[in-house]
Amino acid sequence: MTTIEWTMGVIRAGDEHTTWGTPYSFVCSVRRKHDEAELFAAVGNMSKKIYSQIVAALKDQGVTKITWERRKANIKHVEVNV
């Protein structure tokens, strides 16, 4: 028997995004460890709608905690239990 546990990925989201190759307005990398997901290297605007879709998609895949850091004027660490 062989199993695969994916530990890295890319999240793309947006109103026009439906599958790989279609336009998106937000993208980030995701690192997964067990039931936790860390989002990093984000580009674009994470609207409330996109945030909700990302949380739902990760939750559907068994993720129970999402973390990321926002770096603008200061560093803000965000942790969300889903």
Image (cartoon, helix red, strand yellow):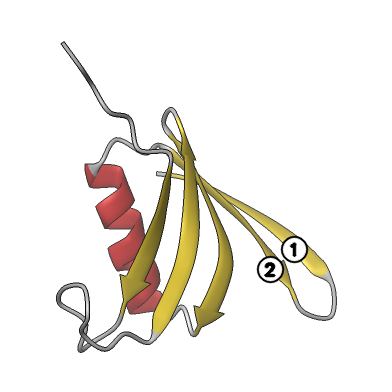
* Nearer to us in this view, 44 or 50: 44
- Tell whether label 2 touches label 1 (CB within 8 Å): yes
**In the image, what residue occupies the spot 50% across and 85% down?**
44
Give the vertical position of 26 relative to 62 (above or below): below
Q: Quadrant of residue 27?
A: bottom left
Q: CA distance from mark 1 to mark 2?
A: 5 Å
Q: Measured from the top left, where is residue 68 in percent x and y?
A: 61, 56
Give the vertical position of 61 relative to 12 (above or below): above
**Number of callouts:** 2
In the rendered view of the protein, which quadrant contains the N terminus?
top left
Type of amino acid under label 1: Lys
Q: Is residue 11 left or right of residue 31?
A: left
Give the vertical position of 20 relative to 3 (above or below): below
Q: Secondary structure at mark 2?
A: strand
Type of amino acid under label 2: Arg
Q: Measured from the top left, where is residue 37 in percent x and y?
A: 47, 44
* Nearer to us in this view, 42 or 63: 42
Q: Measured from the top left, where is residue 74 in percent x and y?
A: 84, 72
Q: Measured from the top left, where is residue 54 in percent x and y?
A: 34, 62
Q: Is residue 15 left or right of residue 63?
A: left
Check disc 1 and report the residue beneath it.
76
Q: Residues within 10 Å of mark 1 (few under 14, many from 20)?
A: few
Check disc 2 and report the residue beneath it.
70
